[in-house]
Image (tube, rainbow, N blue to C red):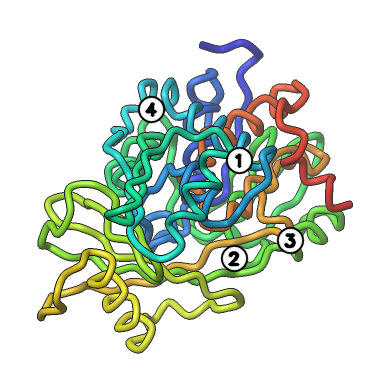
Amino acid sequence: MPLFNSQDIAVIGAGVLGLCTAAELARRGHVVTVVDPGGLNASAVAAGMIAPAMESAVDDLSPEHAALLRRARDAWVDFAAATGVRLNRDPAEWRGGNVEVLAGRLAALGFEQVYDREAGRLTTHEDWKVEPAQALAALTQGVRRLEGRATALSRADGRWHVETTAGSVEADQVVLAIGAEAAPDGLPEAATRLLALISPIRGQIGLVAEGLVDHVVRGPGAYVAPMGQGCVIGATMEAGERSLTPDPERCAQMLGAAWAVLGQTPRPLQVDWRAGVRGATPDGLPMAGAAGQGLHLALGPRRNGWLLGPLVARVVADEVEGRSSKEPTLAPRRFT
């Protein structure tokens, strides 16, 4: 559905924000090359939560922030239909802990929810999820993928030259979606300052072949969610940590919390523990939009990359095409 003259766009990074943006730009008729550094990125080490209700309640978000997360969730409906990403709309549940407080927050923010005081359970149908592996594969359709790490950028005659370990790419415009990774050389000073604000947050999850749940179940210290024929146990939020080696002690604590959430006696369980590093901005919202000179950012969603993907993609694609952002609170210039 091209609305503007087709452009050559380079998207650096192949996590959820980068691939959602690439897919949106390709849908609009642009020629998109994704520079994929390879390996298991943070979007793959995730449960695929699209959860504005629970995220808003757990973090006690403002009404404005919660409304943005709800808009992000709603953006998935058309985006998933267009890209082939499968949405799971089974209910999400919270058990135990400060469940009454969370129920009050959801009610105050206008999220649909059912609170069973006697059972100590809170259920909502406003939170969805995707399977990260299926979604990442679907999002790569229709875009050129170059497996290599971007090392340097330069600009001449109104175009960008992207040097990678797998060759070079010429582009009219560039989207940086590199997570918490180091920036390539040659960026404008203003963009370098913005990227310096991104801080790493490590998240650890465990993959289990056994299907312990048929819908998302959350509680103090852990969640358990369906994943393929099995499930996923998650997740830590470790600010400042970059190691991709799972921490046995923290994983054991998370597993213990998961058994408590499920109300089951711990038993031997084979768990494939994994770690990924996400990026976060100082205010917890992503940077989405223009950073000057045909350079755009899609960075820093904290733990809500899957939730925010299509919304960030739409914001960035609009600005690539010269439109004003409909989500000015995400503009990178808010930090300048």
The disc, 2 or 4, on the residue closer to the chain's N-terminal end is: 4
Dot 1 corresponds to which residue?
66
The disc, 2 or 1, on the residue closer to the chain's N-terminal end is: 1
**x then y, percent, for residue 3:** 61, 10
Q: How many other residues sit within 10 Å of disc 4, few (<14), some (14-19) or many (≥20)?
A: some
The residue closer to the viewer here, 252 or 137, is 252
Left or right, 322 with reference to 30: right
Q: Quadrant of residue 99?
A: bottom left
The disc, 1 or 4, on the residue closer to the chain's N-terminal end is: 1
Q: Residue placed at 50% from the left, 71% from the top?
A: 202
Dot 2 corresponds to which residue?
181
**x then y, percent, for residue 82:** 39, 21
Spatial CA distance of label 3 from label 1 is 17 Å
The residue closer to the viewer here, 253 or 16, is 253
Q: How many other residues sit within 10 Å of disc 3, few (<14), some (14-19) or many (≥20)?
A: few
Determine the secondary structure under disc 4. helix
Three-letter amino acid code of the residue under disc 1 = Ala
Q: Are marks 3 and 1 in contact (CB under 8 Å)?
A: no
Spatial CA distance of label 1 from label 4 is 21 Å
